[in-house]
Amino acid sequence: MPKAIFSIVKISYIGVILGLFLYSYTQVDLNLTLSQWSIWQNIQKSFQYIGWFQRPLSTALYVGILVLLFLFYGLFLYAVKKKLFSLKAFWILIGSVTFVLAFSYNAFSYDLFNYMFDARIVTFHAQNPYEHKALDYPYDPWINFMRWTHRVYPYGPVWLGLTIPLSFIGFQAFLPTLFLFKALSSASFLLSVWCIGKIASLINKDRLFAMALFALNPLVLIEGIVSSHNDIVMMAFGLLSIYFFLENHLTRSIVFLALSIGVKFATALLLPIYLYGWYTKRTNKSLFLLLCLIFMISAVVIATIRTNFQPWYLLNVFPLLSLFADKKAILFSYVVFSVFALSQYIPFLYTGNWNPPIPTILFWLTIIPTAVSLFAILAYRKTTA
């Protein structure tokens, strides 16, 4: 691929990212007014009309954006393998993508609103979110566009410590607070990418390929930046901890693992691996990372059994899986799971509900990539044996 053509590819990709940014605003909740500015309200209503009342068109737009994102994803990975992508060019592209999507609407999940309200319970209502839930404040206008208002705060104290200052700085204004929370997720995404590169170098993997595999993955961009799930913050601290552990900076490693667990408890499953490494005083780096990956996959399995599989659960696995995706079967599974996970939004976008037969469809959208991936891995092992 000539460099001139590759430059056009990068510009075109930013155009698709802008398309995702614009599409996100078709999903603005009908009970939410982002601004009192009359011109903006007219724009918002025209976007909402597509997302909520022209569902076949909305679904077609979503599928079209996904197809383009995955096509560009493949082109960029090919370009990295062919050494057409410099590290500097990669960071410029990722920085541009992150900047655009940091201002997107959390189109595919209401979790961000729950994070904001949990902090608001402290900063506005002066109460403890571990003891109080959103439903305890029925006259708060933010209740109108929320989901899961019946639950108390389910995360660790570190996440509360990170979000309370954002709530204060936002001065209880919805839009500034929303973008501050998204800025936190965006920064965590960039930190995760940096850590993946550092860890890949330590184990003699292709640094740029590992970073590109994670950072340009459509699922990571949508769940980590657009929807801004706090899993990306948890994993950013977790990856920093792993990096410092492999560099034998044990105190820093302990601190960042504690911060990761304090955001969301899934990384607590890494504690046995750390304890073994500290006790024996020797670490096979590749084996250590493989065990971390296996234990984080276990966290996803446990969460899926406890509730249902959610696409953003893969944020717990993909950062570590990126370090092993130089194997063709792993790379294939990585992409297959990404495609099927993001496909789980299609039935809702088309129908506007999660009623039967959608649960059955979602079940098969989980089973199929699992079965296909296991088959691919077994077939790969058989051909290389």
Image (cartoon, helix red, strand yellow):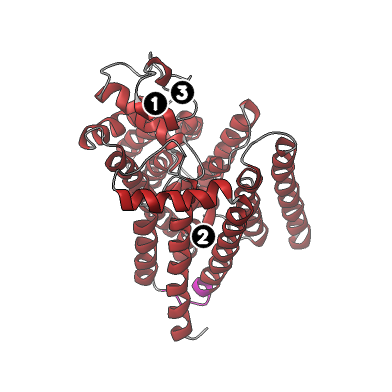
Q: Quadrant of residue 295?
A: top right
**Is disc 1 placed on a helix, strand or loop?**
loop
> How far, Cα to Cα, is label 1 from label 2?
29 Å
Q: Which residue is mark 2?
A: 213
What amino acid is at disc 3?
A: Thr
- Is residue 83 within the magenta segment? yes
- The quarter of the picture where the C terminus appears is bottom right
Please name the amino acid that badge 2 sits on: Leu
Quick check: marks 2 and 3 in contact, CB under 8 Å? Answer: no
Kindly report the distance in space between the C-alpha atoms of the residues bearing marks 2 and 3.
36 Å
Residue 148 vertical placement versus 106 (above, below): above
Residue 341 appears in the figure: yes
Mark 2 vs mark 3: which is more N-terminal? Answer: 3
Name the residue carrying label 3: 149
Q: Is residue 344 above or below residue 218?
A: above
User: Which segment did they paint magenta?
Assistant: 79-85
Q: Identify the residue shown where x is 41% and y is 40%.
A: 238
Tag 2, which secondary structure? helix
Give percent across and percent down for residue 13: 47, 69
Of 1 and 295, which appears nearest the observer?
A: 1
Which mark lies nearer to you, 1 or 3? Answer: 3
Badge 1 amino acid: Gly
Residue 237, percent from left and from top: 37, 40
Name which of mark 1 and mark 2 comes first in the sequence: 1
Q: Where residue 156 is drawn, which disc sits there?
A: 1
Q: Is residue 126 magenta?
A: no
Residue at mark 1 to residue at mark 3: CA–CA distance: 18 Å
Please rate how many residues cluster around mark 1, counting C-alpha atoms within 10 Å: few if below 14, some from 14 to 19, many from 20: some
Write the residue at 58% across / 61% down.
326
